[in-house]
Image (spheres, rainbow, N blue to C red):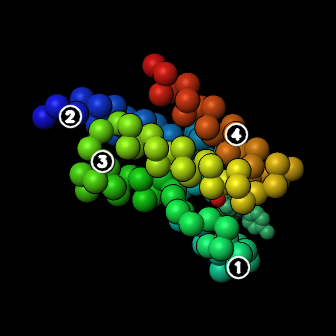
Amino acid sequence: KKYQLELKFCEMVINEITKRKHQGYSYPFLQPVDPVALNIPTYHKIIKKPMDLGTIGQKLKGGQYTNAKEFKADIDLMFDNCYKFNPESDGVYKMGKNFQAVIEELWAT
Ligand SMILES: Cc1ccc(Nc2c(-c3ccc(O)cc3)nc3c(C)cccn23)cc1
């Protein structure tokens, strides 16, 4: 009951950021990183807690977040993973920065 409004806000955020208009920079984050498909066999050696928007959406729908703070922690984890793995010069790193700025803007509303 207490956090219902907060979690509704989280639902709005995820619905917005998974829209097609963000796909130019959101696509690396929409589903779990697939180290086989991406040919990055070291990924799970470097990233101990993978996170992506697909998983976040499922956790939200499944009532696995108590409040907005826990939801945002997974969003932040997703980007931290991206910056840890991808070189600063990599396009995906830059997409992460771009996408995170969009989300932070939304989060602040
Ligand atoms: C050789 C190489 C170098 C970098 C990447 N990064 C990368 C990632 C990625 C996203 C989040 C993350 O925490 C780690 C990786 N997602 C992609 C996609 C969807 C396409 C191309 C590259 N991508 C892939 C292969």
Task: Give the class, few, some or many, for how many residues have Cα within 10 Å of label 4's Cα (few <14, many ≥20).
Answer: some
Q: Amino acid at mark 2?
A: Gln
Task: Give the class, few, some or many, for how many residues have Cα within 10 Å of label 1's Cα (few <14, many ≥20).
Answer: few
Residue drawn at the location 38% of the way across and 43% of the way down: 70
Element assignment for label 2 = helix
Residue drawn at the location 46% of the way across and 19% of the way down: 109
Which badge, 4 or 1, is on the more N-terminal residue? 1
Query: To which quarter of the image does residue 67 belong?
Result: top left
Which badge, 3 or 4, is on the more N-terminal residue? 3
Residue position for label 1: 41
Q: Are marks 3 and 2 in contact (CB under 8 Å)?
A: no
Q: Quadrant of ligand 1?
A: bottom right
Which badge, 4 or 2, is on the more N-terminal residue? 2
Residue position for label 4: 97
Q: Are marks 3 and 4 in contact (CB under 8 Å)?
A: no
Element assignment for label 3 = loop
Element assignment for label 4 = helix
Element assignment for label 1 = loop
Q: Which numbered marker is on residue 4?
A: 2
Which badge, 3 or 2, is on the more N-terminal residue? 2
Q: Amino acid at mark 1?
A: Pro
Q: Could you say where residue 13 lies in the image, as x and y percent from the top left?
A: 42, 36
Q: Amino acid at mark 3?
A: Tyr
Q: Which numbered marker is on residue 65?
A: 3
Which badge, 2 or 1, is on the more N-terminal residue? 2
The alpha-carbon separation of the residues under discs 4 and 2 comes to 29 Å
Location of the N terminus by quadrant is top left
Q: Amino acid at mark 4?
A: Lys
In this rendering, the label closer to the viewer, 3 or 4: 3
The alpha-carbon separation of the residues under discs 4 and 1 comes to 24 Å
